[in-house]
Amino acid sequence: MKSVIINDIEYFDVSDIKKNHRDLKIDIREMITEGGVKLIKAEHVTLLTDFDMTMRDLFNRKP
């Protein structure tokens, strides 16, 4: 997972999480933008629940 340290705090690249880690979800209310890149602290990244996966799969179905 792509990360960067800002003021001694590690942040993760939100686009990398969305693209490469489909089993994770982020709290979008806690995102920051630095240099045009959306970042999030690790504490605001969690595993998807069974409900989350069901909803994701339901809305990502192609007719």
Image (cartoon, helix red, strand yellow):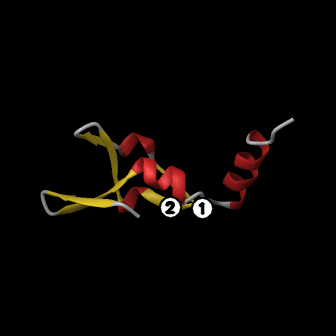
The kind of residue tagged 2 is Thr
Residue at 31%, 42% in the rendered image: 37
Residue 52: x percent and y percent? 67, 52
Q: Quadrant of the N terminus?
A: bottom left
Q: Residue furthest right?
A: 63
The kind of residue tagged 1 is Asp
Residue at 50%, 61% in the rendered image: 46
- The residue tagged 2 is 46
Residue 57: x percent and y percent? 75, 49
- Mark 1 lies on a secondary structure that is loop
The disc placed on residue 23 is 1
Q: Quadrant of the C terminus?
A: top right
Q: How many marks?
A: 2
Please state which of the two labelled residues, at mark 1 or mark 2, is closer to the viewer: 1
Measure how far apart labels 1 and 2 are at the Cα level.
9 Å
Residue at 25%, 59% in the rendered image: 4
Relative to residue 25, is residue 43 drawn left or right?
left
Counting residues from the start of the chain, the first of labels 1 and 2 encountered is 1
Relative to residue 18, is residue 44 drawn left or right?
left
Q: Residue furthest left?
A: 7
